[in-house]
Image (tube, rainbow, N blue to C red):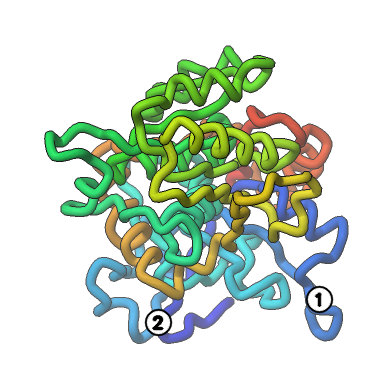
Amino acid sequence: MPVPGPNEVVIRTHAVAANPVDWFIQAMGLIVPADGGYPAVLGCDLAGEVVSVGANVSASGDASFAPGDRVCGLAGAHGAGDFKSGAFQLYAKTNKGLLAKIPDSVSFAQAAVLPLGLSTAATALFQRDAMALPLPLPGTATAAMDENGQKKKVILVWGGRTSVGSCGIQLAVAAGFDVATTASARNHGYCRSLGATWVFDYHDEGIEDGIVEALRGHECVGVFDAWSRGSVAQCARILLKLEKNGSVSSGRKWVQTVLPGAAQVGEEVPEGVEVGYAYGSTLVHNEVGPAIWGKWVPEALASGALQCKPEPEVVAKGLDGIQTACDMGAKGWGTSSSPKLVVELI
């Protein structure tokens, strides 16, 4: 049984979701320290019930938790070598800054789809070393509006049907931005239901010019490439074209990716465009974590402003089903509309 540190919470896990990073680590041994790193319990996405809390948790304002609270959060922030922090076990511990209470109207399976996708999107959009957009809190959204209160700034989210893209759309809309996104034709309605204003079919050969024309007259603050496999250079070209018609914010051309660094892109990105990456759990070390997990997530879930998307696909029940979910994910991974595979541990 894990013992919580001063800023930690121990959770009885009721549902977990599988992510590409999980089967990547398992297959390749990435992140796991060679010396003392095994056994390694993986897993990032969890939802469950609070069992115990650390000394600094119960009196910590927005991030206050008590035994019996229903929560979801990001596990594994300490790395794969800390086997007590991975989500893929019956009891796991996580930092209070990566955790949010969930209302009774949200099931554990629904909540389990959020943590990694939401944290990755929030890190990319709001951290100062990333896109540094205004946080989705009262009094900040006006930064994205003109003097008449109309949204004039826009962000392009490439891959709106992905888990990270779905969260990115909702976060950007909450922060006061118009969102343009890409998805296959069958998922256009899905993206609009999350708040996207424009949705473009990434199969369209003329998509670059189509996006540039549609965003004419708006100020594009950059591109969040939530897919980042063969799309980074394309996103960069779009920004250069937007610059030519005066639609790029402050002259800065920024593509934020979900890859572990610009060197991993493997594409020829045009000069003059910055490519950035920010690791999802780093938001616990700055103002983004408390703002998103401590404040926005619980309020947005309660009001319905945050949807748990993509919908969970429960593929197994019990701890022995976790490997089943990872194997299914690894086999079917490679499309932007892959479902979020969930295992229930009731």
Q: Which mark is residue 52?
A: none
Say left or right for 290 vs 22: left
Examine the rendered structure and indicate whether residue 109 appears above or below residue 43: above
Identify the image quadrant of residue 71.
bottom left
Where is residue 228 shown, x and y percent of the image? 68, 43
Q: Residue at x 42, y 35 (%)?
A: 246
Q: Residue at x 58, y 33 (%)?
A: 238
Q: Residues within 10 Å of mark 2 (few under 14, many from 20)?
A: some
Say left or right for 182 vs 98: right
Identify the image quadrant of residue 203.
top right
Residue sitting nearer the eye, 272 or 194: 272
Where is residue 208 shown, x and y percent of the image? 60, 24
Say left or right for 87 vs 300: right
Where is residue 223 shown, x and y percent of the image? 52, 42
Q: Quadrant of the N terminus?
A: bottom right
Residue sitting nearer the eye, 239 or 46: 239
Q: Amino acid at mark 2?
A: Gly
Mark 2 lies on residue: 54
How far, Cα to Cα, is label 2 from label 1?
26 Å
Q: Which residue reaches farthest left?
A: 148
Q: Amino acid at mark 1?
A: Tyr
Say left or right for 104 vs 330: left
Q: Is residue 306 visible?
A: yes
Q: Which mark is residue 38?
A: 1
Tell me whether the residue at label 2 lies in contact with that at label 1, contact meaning CB atoms closer than 8 angstroms: no
